[in-house]
Image (cartoon, rainbow, N blue to C red):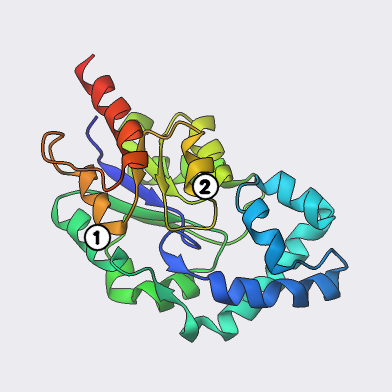
């Protein structure tokens, strides 16, 4: 499998928004009348799908757009506190240097993506799909494929949530799971990702020959091995 285009989720994959999100959640809960969370809730919720989290929070689907809109405003006010995960910028630059095109698909804003990653790096991306999507994340991915003229077989979508895996699978794009994001890595591995990355430096597996690519953990090895076996069949 030759990767020509790597599409990234933003929050929890490239940008470490955990602190701002955690500190904003209960403020949003009070305003929008859903259940507040405690530190004890976190381990269980990090293994849940988006639909399961909404049920756990007793947050009706019709309220979600307003909650997300308010959260994006809160995040924008604190965007100076948000940093890329250590090593992600260097990994993205290395991908570009090795001829892998980059894109971002996120419900966050383009302003926030530029503020965190830097406008110079973002200007080198082949596509940037931001903001609320009426038809969901899979629609964003399709639009990026059309915009860049890339076949689904030549692309990978890299994210940290179960819904990222679902969106990729829905349109036939390979999914790459990251270990440093919101959802527990073990839960992501149950989705049978094509590739798994324990640390940002492992993104080099997208351009290194299979004989040189090295998974950084035992848990990451099996999905990578599966991808290599597909290449040889």
Residue 168 in percent (x, y) is at 48, 37
Q: Which mark is residue 74?
A: none
> Residue drawn 23% across and 66% down?
90
Residue 3 in percent (x, y) is at 25, 38
Residue 177, quarter of picture: top left
> Residue drawn 30% across and 44% down?
5
Task: Determine if residue 7 is in view.
Answer: yes
Label 2's element?
A: helix
Furthest residue in direction top, as rendered:
233
User: Which circle's residue, 2 or 1, is located before the other in the chain?
Assistant: 1
Answer few, some or many: residues within 10 Å of disc 1's Cα (few below 14, many 20 plus, some between 14 and 19).
some
Q: Nearer the viewer, residue 132 or 11?
A: 11
Q: Which residue is the site of mark 2?
A: 140
Answer few, some or many: residues within 10 Å of disc 2's Cα (few below 14, many 20 plus, some between 14 and 19).
many
Q: Is residue 93 left or right of residue 35?
A: left
Label 1's element?
A: helix
Q: Which mark is residue 91?
A: 1
């Amino acid at each position: 499998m030759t990767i020509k285009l790597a599409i990234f989720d933003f929050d929890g994959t490239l940008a470490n928004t955990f602190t701002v999100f955690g500190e904003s959640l209960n403020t949003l809960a009070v305003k929008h009348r859903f259940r507040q969370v405690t530190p004890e809730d976190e381990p269980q919720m990090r293994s849940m799908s988006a639909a399961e989290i909404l049920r756990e929070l007793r947050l009706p689907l019709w309220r979600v757009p307003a909650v997300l809109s308010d959260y994006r405003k809160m995040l924008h006010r604190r965007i100076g506190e948000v940093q890329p995960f250590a090593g992600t910028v260097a990994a993205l630059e290395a991908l570009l240097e090795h001829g892998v095109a980059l894109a971002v698909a996120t419900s966050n804003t383009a302003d926030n993506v530029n503020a965190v990653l830097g406008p110079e790096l973002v200007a080198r991306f082949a596509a940037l799909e931001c903001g609320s999507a009426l038809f969901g994340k899979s629609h964003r991915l399709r639009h990026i494929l059309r915009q860049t003229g890339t076949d689904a077989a030549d692309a990978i979508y890299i994210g940290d949530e179960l819904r990222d895996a679902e969106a990729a699978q829905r349109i036939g794009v390979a999914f790459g799971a990251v270990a440093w994001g919101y959802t527990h890595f073990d839960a992501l591995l149950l989705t049978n990702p094509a590739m798994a990355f324990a640390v940002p430096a492992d993104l080099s597996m997208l351009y290194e020959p299979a004989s040189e690519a090295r998974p950084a953990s035992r848990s990451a090895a099996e999905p990578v091995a599966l991808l290599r076996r597909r290449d040889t069949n």
